[in-house]
Amino acid sequence: MKACQPLAVKGTMLRRSLLLFFCALAALSFTACKKDKAPEQTAPRETREVKATGARQNRGKKIKDTLSGLEEADRAAALKLLREEHREQKNKKEEKEEEIEMTPGFFPVSDGAKRLIEDANLLLRQGADSDSKIEALENLIGIDHPDILPTIELALDDDDPVVREVALDAIMNINSEEVVPVVMKALDDPEPDLRLVSLDALMDVKSERINDALQKALKDENEEIREGVMDLLFISENPAALPTIKTAMTDSSPSVREGALQCIEDIPDKGAVDILVYDGLLSDYEDVREASKEALEFITDEEFETYDEAKAWWTKNRASFDFDF
């Protein structure tokens, strides 16, 4: 196996990727803690509202301050460890699921879960106070079943951004393509933070349907949302998202284009190489052409002087090519 030679990136971009990854892990841990909490232990509204008034930014600032003191090599090493941890967590989850004799799709929800869903629906339709709606939605966190999705869609119409955010918390671990329409609705939210948060629900969804939501997010005028798409895909290394990565390589933002190239070089899929050869090397953007060449040489362990040379080599070797990472 050849030595790892990742794309050269600006320090600011690397810090941003690390920052978003740390935040993603923190969000996952936060959700896990909420799952274990009994409904009667619901935090007061003052505590819940912290999320809507900048708690994410405060956590991010602390992480960024910590990372800013690290050397570039140390930051790269930290990122590598975090990605390995993410893969390990996914592997453990998959192994646990394999131990259970599963029927196709999801098991029916329990009677208790049905009552929680019905209660939340009733409160949302009756226009109950925000505290009651938030408590009812928090009771849905941990059900992780598509049956809660109609209730979540209803909650996304609420005027209170805290209600909408708690609703999004409830879908983070469903890991089914059925969450895509809900995420697409959330991407119309007037709050940029909630649009960004909604993307996390697609982290472990492997269906190509996620491109419907991701492509919509790439049209967002807020550059941070578009960068968030790349951060998500950089962590998940999802081949199903290659169409979105291809689109991102044409984005007007250099940081989004750079993020797309960071994503694609770590996806062991021949479709990724196709994009590098037939789109990246012919890009209108010089930075994309250069980065595509570097990524292509890293993946293939070959050197190419021209597009025609790269195209000829890939045409000849595509069928037999094996990734060594």
Image (tube, rainbow, N blue to C red):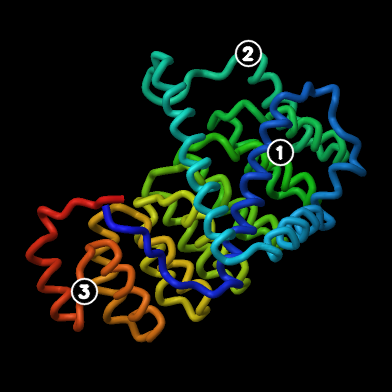
218 to the left or right of 299: right
Q: Give coordinates of residue 177: x percent, y percent.
A: 45, 41
Mark in front: 3 vs 1: 3
Q: Which mark is residue 30?
A: 1
SS for callout 3 = loop
Read off the residue under disc 3: 303
Query: What residue is rendered at 73% in x and 27% in y?
Result: 139
Residue type of the residue flagged with mark 2:
Asp
136 to the left or right of 274: right
Read off the residue under disc 2: 111
27 to the left or right of 287: right
Q: As rendered, which of 162 and 28 lies closer to the eye?
A: 28
User: For residue 316, which quarter of the picture?
Assistant: bottom left
Residue type of the residue flagged with mark 1:
Phe
Q: How packed is label 1: few (under 14 Cα within 10 Å), some, or many (20 or more)?
A: few
Kindly check if marks 3 and 1 are in contact, taking CB atoms under 8 A apart as contact: no
Q: Give coordinates of residue 191: x percent, y percent.
A: 72, 61
Q: Give coordinates of residue 118: x percent, y percent.
A: 69, 25
Q: Is residue 234 above or below residue 46?
A: below
SS for callout 2 = helix
Residue type of the residue flagged with mark 3:
Glu
Query: What residue is rendered at 37% in x and 75% in y?
Result: 291
Q: Hey, which residue is sitting farthest left in the picture?
A: 316
Q: As rendered, which of 83 and 171 lies closer to the eye?
A: 83
Q: How packed is label 2: few (under 14 Cα within 10 Å), some, or many (20 or more)?
A: few
| N-term-proximal mark, 3 vs 1 | 1
Q: Is residue 293 above or below residue 199?
A: below
Q: How packed is label 3: few (under 14 Cα within 10 Å), some, or many (20 or more)?
A: few
Q: Give coordinates of residue 256: x percent, y percent.
A: 50, 72
126 to the left or right of 289: right
Query: What residue is rendered at 37% in x and 49% in y?
Result: 208
